[in-house]
Amino acid sequence: MRAALIQMRASMNKEENLDRAEVFLKEAARQGADVACLQEMFATWFFAQRLDPAAQALAEPVDGPTVSRIRSVARTLGLLVVVPFYERAMAGELYNSVVLVDGWGEILGVYRKHHIPMSSHFQEKFYFRPGNTGYRVFDTPIGRIGLLICYDRHFPEAARVVGLAGAEVVFVPTATTRRGPSRLAWEVELRGHAIANGYFVGGVNRVGTELESEYYGSSLFIDPIGQVLCQAGDTDEEVLVADLDRARLEEVRRSWPFYRDRRPETYRPLTEL
């Protein structure tokens, strides 16, 4: 599997962002990518830094302009695309979501972000309901793809569930800034998920400054022993491409048989309130 991460700047001009994403997806296809992942809610700034009721109007249905445009691009390029967007399921029911689109432009399914943060500089509970799709892993012609979104990555239980569901690569689109300690945890945390679960991880972040926040990029691919295969810079837009050898999964899981040696009967305290 050859995979790509699209690290880009964003504006509040949705059409401009869609145009830029299309250019980068074409570059990923030119480099031979089978699948490409865009960053969290790539079609606008990550506006959830502030409380602004008007911003809820940016949400779209699955058949809205953002997903429809990328479906067309995916069909033209024959490229699977992970498409993060602000989803309007119905009036007042809004989610931070991702759809996986196949190389024929068909939607394989939707994942809705489960863990919704609220802090001095991320007001996400105002904009998004917690996801209700369960943790999703999709069978595709190139392998089993799992999805998590940004804040989900801080929860090892979520990373484990997609591993138990058979994920071979997990894409994590994010919008994570230099504010707070996030940069210290970014690489270490994703490496930990790869090691503990024996799968590849692709974490993609944005770059540039939006409102009060500066994004640090540093998108990366990690192999199942936690080795960083490649990493983007922290200021520039980039199409990061890596070959993810699925045979490596079998090799690693033979030497580190964590799934064999799990003791789920001892983990009951994890689900007790």
Image: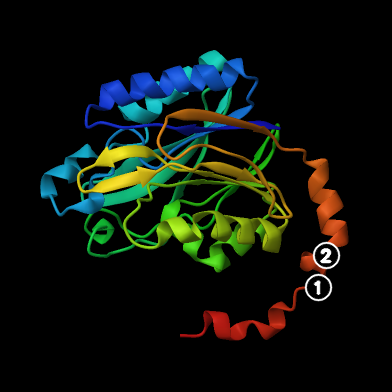
Real-space Cα distance between discs 1 and 2?
6 Å
Q: Please say which color scheme the image uses.
A: rainbow
User: Can you give x and y, in whole percent of width and height, for residue 200 in the image?
Assistant: 67, 47
Residue 78 in view here: no
- Mark 1: give few (<14), some (14-19) or many (20+) Cα within 10 Å: few
Front one among 261 and 177: 177
Looking at the figure, which quarter contains the N terminus?
A: top right
Q: Residue at x 26, y 65 (%)?
A: 119
Q: Residue at x 54, y 56 (%)?
A: 135
User: Can you give x and y, in whole percent of width and height, for residue 110 in the image?
Assistant: 47, 43
Find disc 2 in the rendering and name its residue: 257
User: Mark number for residue 121?
Assistant: none
Q: Amino acid at mark 1?
A: Asp
Front one among 141 and 31: 31
Find disc 1 in the rendering and name its residue: 261
Against 233, residue 180 (above or below) is below
Badge 1 vs badge 2, beta-carbon distance below 8 Å: yes
User: Can you give x and y, in whole percent of width and height, for residue 173 in the image?
Assistant: 46, 44
Q: Is residue 176 left or right of residue 268?
A: left
Against 10, residue 178 (above or below) is below
Q: Is residue 112 left or right of residue 243?
A: left
In the picture, residue 45 is in which quadrant?
Answer: top left
Q: Secondary structure at mark 1?
A: helix
Front one among 136 and 4: 4
Q: Residue at x 81, y 73 (%)?
A: 261
In the picture, residue 231 is in which quadrant?
Answer: top right
Q: Residue at x 70, y 82 (%)?
A: 265
Looking at the figure, which quarter contains the C terminus?
A: bottom left
Q: Secondary structure at mark 2?
A: loop
Q: Amino acid at mark 2?
A: Pro
